[in-house]
Amino acid sequence: MGAETLGPTVLVVEDEDSLATLISYNLGKEGYRVVLCADGEEALVLIDESPPDLILLDWMLPTVSGIEICRRLRQRAETRNIPLVMLTARGEESDRVRGLDTGADDYVVKPFSMAELVARLRAVLRRLRPGLAEDKVKHGDILIDRVAHRVTRGDEDVHLGPTEFRLLDHLMQHPGRVFSREQLLDAVWGSDVYVEARTVDVHIGRLRRALSRGAQTHGPDPIRTVRSAGYSLNG
Ligand code: CA
């Protein structure tokens, strides 16, 4: 684990294998966690199961088109605010994307360079999810520096283990949002790792102690326990 941090999770919905692979490779290099999907119907299921931080969505897809996916996501409160970038072919489609109120936050016209794609995704995240795109994120008096792998509260260093660091990072990306233990396990430990739910409680406890240890400058406990629901960082 070391200095590794969790980048934003991006769901790439693209049925052209070679393009999907190229995008995945390049976004991976930029620190994103990439989930690939080649089918519209499957994308909707994936988004329901585990909402990504960002969706990159091709217009032309098998089963359900990108534009229909976009429309459905925007109709539901749970998915309405997920940042979404459409990929379109040059020509009529891009005009329609521009002209229709699809609810996409941006669109990129094929063919595009990987540098352009990376820049556009970053710009959308910076605008809609500043906590995900920046190297340093502040919440109240807590500052997390993802590059230096350092956390401070007020003027004091906060010493965290790697798991507590990732937990805090995840909570700071979504202040105010309540996460169940299972959701935190998926996000921080990974969905393919078997860890008991109460392990989350142990690490939340360590994180709380570290954030409120000693110094007078340390403020009140920033983490809220929501009975039978989970945890959130006070918004
Ligand atoms: Ca396609």
Image (cartoon, rainbow, N blue to C red):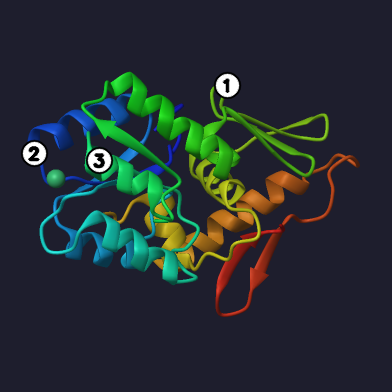
Residue occupying image coordinates x 29% and y 54%: 193
Q: Relative to 112, is 81 above or below?
A: below
Q: Are marks 2 and 3 in contact (CB under 8 Å)?
A: no
Q: Are marks 1 and 3 in contact (CB under 8 Å)?
A: no
> In the orientation shown, which residue stands out farthest toward the right?
216
| Mark 2, secondary structure of its residue | helix
Answer with mark 1 or mark 2, whichever residue precedes in sequence.
2
- Amino acid type indicated by mark 3: Thr
Residue highlighted by disc 3:
88
Residue highlighted by disc 1:
148
Q: Is residue 57 visible?
A: yes
| Mark 1, secondary structure of its residue | loop
Q: Position of residue 165 (x, y in %)?
A: 55, 40
Q: Nearer the viewer, mark 1 or mark 2?
A: 2
Q: Residues within 10 Å of mark 1 (few under 14, many from 20)?
A: few
The picture quadrant for ligand 1 comes to top left
Q: How many marks?
A: 3
Residue highlighted by disc 2:
17
Q: Nearer the viewer, mark 2 or mark 3?
A: 3
Residue occupying image coordinates x 43% and y 39%: 6
Answer with mark 1 or mark 3, whichever residue precedes in sequence.
3
Horizontally, residue 210 falls left or right of residue 87, namely right
Q: Is residue 129 visible?
A: no
Residue occupying image coordinates x 18% and y 63%: 64
Horizontally, residue 159 falls left or right of residue 106, namely right
